[in-house]
Image: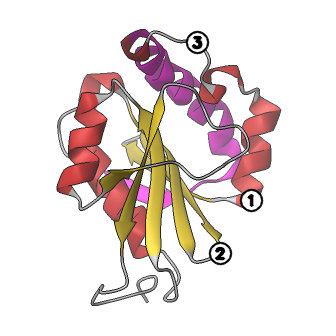
Amino acid sequence: MELTEVRPEDCPELLVLQRCCWVQEAVLNNTLDIPALHETLEDLRDWTKTWSVWVLRQEHRLVGAVRARLDGDCWEVGRLMVAPDLAGRGLGRRLLAHAEAHAPADVRRFALFTGARSTRNITMYQRAGYRLVDAPAVDGHIRGAVYLEKDVTQRENPGPPA
C-alpha cells in the first residue's frame, strides 16, 4: 500500500470513501448530523487546501485517508477513514501514526473528535495514547461526538520525517 499526499485528482474518490465511512458512523451514532456526510466535492477540495491530507492506496484503489492541521500548539487530526471492507487491519493506526509524525516540532498536543458511540474508534485512539477530555468551545462541534487529546510534550522525535 502506498501512502501519499492528496492530489487534486484524488478528491472525487476521497469524497466517495468519506461518505461510505461516515454512513456507518451515522448508523452507529444514530444521527445524520455529521458534517462529513453533507460536504460537497467543492467543500472537500477547499479543505484539502487548508489541511495536510494523506491518502492510502491499495494498487489503484483509495482505501484510506487522514487530515491534520496546526491550531496554536495543537495538531488537529480529522477525517481519519478506512474503507469499511478493510477495517480492523491496522490501516487506521498507520494513518494516525503518519499524521502524528508530520506534526510540527512545537506541537504540545494532538486532538480529534469521534462519535460517542464509536467504541472501536475510541479504543484505537486510547491505545495510541489519547484520552477523553471535555471538548473546547469549537464552532461546528457535533452533538454526539467526543473529544480526545494526547499530550506530546515528551515525544522523542518531534516534527515530520526528513
Query: Residue 150 at x, y = what percent?
Result: 35, 65
Between discs 3 and 2, the one toward the N terminus: 3
**Residue labelled with disc 3:** 32
> Label 2 is placed on what type of residue?
Gly
**Residue labelled with disc 2:** 72
Tell me the CA gap for discs 3 and 2: 30 Å
Query: Residue 122 at x, y = what percent?
Result: 28, 40
**Could you tell me which residue is drawn at 45 percent across and 9 percent down?**
30
> Label 3 is placed on what type of residue?
Leu
Between discs 1 and 3, the one toward the N terminus: 3
Query: Residue 142 at x, y = what percent?
Result: 60, 31
User: Which of the colour schemes (rainbow, by chain, secondary structure, one colour) is used?
Assistant: secondary structure
What is the number of the mark on residue 150? none
Q: Nearer the viewer, residue 104 or 144?
A: 144
Between discs 2 and 1, the one toward the N terminus: 1
**Could you tell me which residue is drawn at 76 percent across and 26 percent down?**
40
Tell me the CA gap for discs 1 and 3: 25 Å
**Residue labelled with disc 1:** 50
Please tell me in which quadrant of the rendered image residue 43 appears.
top right
Magenta segment: 1-27
Label 2 element class: loop
Label 1, residues with CA under 10 Å away: few <14, some 14-19, many ≥20: few
Residue 96 left/right relative to 31: left
The answer to whether residue 61 shows anywhere in this view is no
Is 142 drawn above or below residue 113 in the view shown?
A: above
Task: Tell me the quarter of the image containing the C terminus.
Answer: bottom left
Q: Main secondary structure of the magenta part?
A: helix
